[in-house]
Image (cartoon, rainbow, N blue to C red):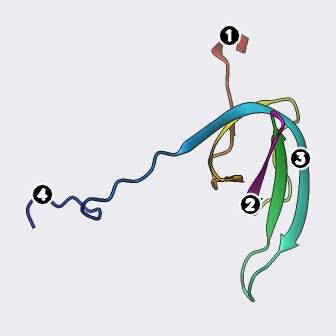
Amino acid sequence: MAGFRGGRRGYKASPKNIGRGILEVTSTDGPHTEWLGMQPYYIHTLCIDGEEYSYLSNDQELGIDIGKKVTFRYKGSAIEKRSLGIVIDPSELN
């Protein structure tokens, strides 16, 4: 097939929603397991700039302190796995 580059023909993925803000409150629920043999996971509920999001993780601790500026990709109110991170401001280094 000439011109075919690995995706479905005519399919365009919707752009990712990107969020950024100050982490205000966190709460953790878990551990949860869906089926036998599955690793336990935790549901972190995060309040970022007044909006609530959920984030699934294998770790009980989120690892981000309250008051830090974070960035993430999300769909609805769920943050995508491995997309949550701290914003680094170059002016604050040194």
Q: Residues within 10 Å of mark 2 (few under 14, many from 20)?
A: some
Where residue 5 appears, x then y in whole percent?
Answer: 21, 58
Where residue 12 appears, x then y in whole percent?
Answer: 35, 53
- According to the picture, the residue beneath numbered tag 2 turns out to be 56
Q: CA distance from mark 3 to mark 1?
A: 27 Å
Q: Residues within 10 Å of mark 4 (few under 14, many from 20)?
A: few
Q: Which residues are magenta?
A: 49-58
Marks 2 and 1: which is nearer the front?
A: 2
Marks 1 and 4: which is nearer the front?
A: 4
N-term mark: 4 or 3: 4
N-term mark: 4 or 2: 4
Q: Could you tell me which secondary element the residue under label 1 belongs to?
A: helix
Q: Is residue 92 visible?
A: yes
Q: Which mark is residue 38?
A: none
Q: CA distance from mark 1 to mark 4?
A: 46 Å
Q: Residue at x 85, y 53 (%)?
A: 61
Give yes or no for contact between labels 2 and 1 (Cβ–Cβ under 8 Å): no
- According to the picture, the residue beneath numbered tag 3 turns out to be 26
Q: Which mark is residue 3?
A: 4
Where residue 62 appears, x then y in whole percent?
Answer: 82, 49
Q: Could you tell me which secondary element the residue under label 3 belongs to?
A: strand
Locate residue 90 relative to residue 46 in the image: left or right.
Answer: left
Q: Amino acid at mark 1?
A: Ser
N-term mark: 3 or 2: 3
Location of residue 66 (image quadrant): top right
